[in-house]
Amino acid sequence: MAWTSPFAPRARRGRVFIQSASGTETGRRALHAGLHGVDGRDPEGECVGTPLESWVDEAARLTKPDRVVYCDGSEAEYQRMVAKMLSGRDTSTLNEKTFPNCYLHRSNPTDVARTEHLTFICSRQKDQAGPTNNWMDPAEARQKVGGLLDGAMRGRTMYVVPYIMGPVNSPISQVGVQATDSPYVVASMRIMSRMGKVAMDRLGSSREFVPGLHSLGDLDPQRRLIAHFPEEKLIWSVGSGYGGNALLGKKCFALRIASVMAREQGWMAEHMLILGLESPGGKVTYMGAAFPSACGKTNLAMMVSALENQGYRVWTVGDDIAWMKIGDDGYLHAINPEAGFFGVAPGTGMKTNQNVMGALRKNTLFTNVAMTQQREPWWEGIGGEPPEGLTDWRGEKWDPAKGPAAHPNARYTVPASQSPSISPKWEAPEGVPISAFVFGGRRARVAPLVYESFDWQHGVFVGATMASETTAAITGAVGVTRRDPMAMLPFCGYNMADYFQHWLEMGKKIPKPPKIFHVNWFRKGADGKFLWPGYGENVRVLKWILERVEGRGAAQETPIGYVPAKNGLTLDGISVPDAALDELLRVNPQDWEAELSNTKEFFAKFGARLPRQISEEHEKLARRLQPMVTA
Ligand code: GTP
Ligand code: SPV
Ligand code: MN
């Protein structure tokens, strides 16, 4: 067992790695590997170095790698990881002239999206996880996942990846440590977080870090589990090498575990992009927007504004996750815990998003995209007809009869700093002050293009009643409408009724709370086509939101909230037919009646735990709709 630890040069005492044969023993060992690990003591109570080293020791005792390597986050190390990936069959170098330092990774075809049915919240009480999460008893999880992790790294290297979620010197940032046997995960973590020496320097000998143990296992979906222990602030993931299942800093830590911490400590961890809208004169107004997976966060955050010639421009702070604390100025301040974008490739092209396309020309890791004969990445929606001789995402010659060339959830992993739209404030330690929250989803019907809630409590209700059609970002059926409160359904680490309560309480604590809006870029006409052009044109909606924040903006009161008056949206330069605009802004009482009964059913799941304010808002909406329905 060889050790390489640039951070702990001091002599190590020889340690006996206890190996066990019996399942019960495995379970007990597993318990030590995480749940007792971070206190810097071994199971016998002896001090064994820093809390980090102690946890790593025990993780290694469980998974039994041949080697343990501490990652320093250097460029040389990144290249070593890439070389390891290239030595296998699933990674290729892309065209060095047109896409320098870019690689294509093909994940196992059964491992191409988050698997929500295999994702568990392992709180002591089932009620703590709530009716919308999969729950597993922590002891059972230790047994089950521990069993899968036992010896999982035999013949492999365990990489220890210390990382910071958030800007290096921000008080809002936090440290995590991921142990993994996947070089792809290490390379991805280097793009997605501040990784290696910076994190070790921030951590020192502190025990304040969230440990995450990850092994590819054998990639069999039958032996895949992603387990979160909210009381211990610990993550165990086995059997997947894909995105949100395997990059533990992202959804597992920054949302599921962090949402628990945020509630305990009075802040917010949300599935939100963060953008700054610059208006004529140069003032920048910041907004956070929560849309479910593959519903347009990255594209909105990195938008090329259609109103640039009128002085409106969008600056990117984050594209997926926001951590927010109340600042001294009374505003909620947001940081982006991530350092890169793990974005959906299909649909991204020069017509829809030049900023993203510009960012992807170098230092980018592509996953499950197709490849041209010139070894350039390709996907549906990149623009133009598919070129001759495409290699599909599985690495085979593309046969259009077998489906799209790129997997619908193909992704790019790119440093945030490469985006032409990156905000000068994106690494500000104090974060950016948030003036508006925007909820949104993919709804062919019901939800208008944009509306504003009446007040914070109503806004929380609007978030709590969000719904969206499912996408390829998760395994399972695509296009099924499901309730997805605040886009957090798959990411809230505790009972969602308590999460609503937390939102309500934050509203009372924030002296200058953001105004709350709802948008829907995906409303369709009778012909099944999107009514709204979307992408860069969405800035027109952001402009109206900004005007409402500033107490301007023509609006019309409806039972669901304020909708733009017909002259409220700036529509010069696009041709949205009058009838389409009417449909986009229409509040159809019949649709909303059906919505009311559907949300009632959803809320019933929470029983008495549902905050009374949510039921109150439900009743208020029903009352406001009544005259319209009977009219
Ligand atoms: P996650 O990374 O899974 O959280 O997704 P996301 O919310 O960041 O979504 P993203 O911006 O990557 O967009 C997902 C898909 O929706 C892509 O195929 C986009 O091309 C498409 N999309 C984004 N914005 C719009 C829009 O305004 N209109 C339409 N019609 N499609 C859009
Ligand atoms: C999402 O599914 O919301 C993503 C991709 O952002 S993943 O990292 O897989 O969660
Ligand atoms: Mn996401």
Image (cartoon, rainbow, N blue to C red):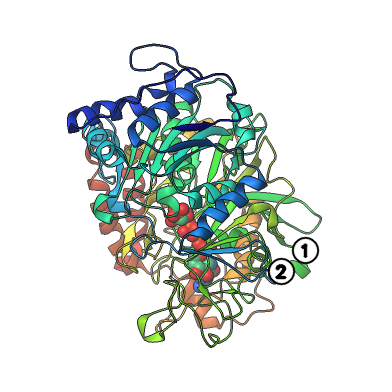
Task: Residue 256: tell me if it is visible.
Answer: yes
x, y percent for residue 519: 50, 61
- The front one of 598 and 554 is 598
x, y percent for residue 506: 48, 34
Q: Is residue 485 above or below residue 444?
A: above
CB of residue at label 2: within 8 Å of ligand 1?
no
Task: Residue 521: tell me if it is visible.
Answer: no
Residue at image point 44% right, 82% down: 398
Residue at image point 33% right, 48% down: 217
**Quarter of the image where one finds residue 146:** top left
**Quarter of the image where one finds residue 564:** bottom right
- The front one of 126 and 326 is 126
Secondary structure under the numbered disc 2 in the rendered image: loop
Which residue is disc 2 drawn over? Answer: 307
Distance from disc 2 to disc 1, alpha carbons, whole Å, reads 7 Å
Q: On the picture, is 204 further left or further right than 411?
A: right
**Amino acid type, label 2:** Leu
Which residue is disc 1 drawn over? Answer: 311
- The front one of 37 and 502 is 37
Q: Is residue 474 above or below residue 340?
A: below
x, y percent for residue 437: 54, 49
**Amino acid type, label 1:** Gly
Q: On the picture, is 208 further left or further right than 537?
A: left
Bin the neighbour count of mark 2 within 10 Å (Cα to Cα): few under 14, some 14-19, many 20 and up. many
Quarter of the picture containing the C terminus is bottom left
Quadrant for ligand 2? Answer: bottom left
Residue at image point 26% right, 29% down: 124
Q: Are marks 2 and 1 in contact (CB under 8 Å)?
A: yes
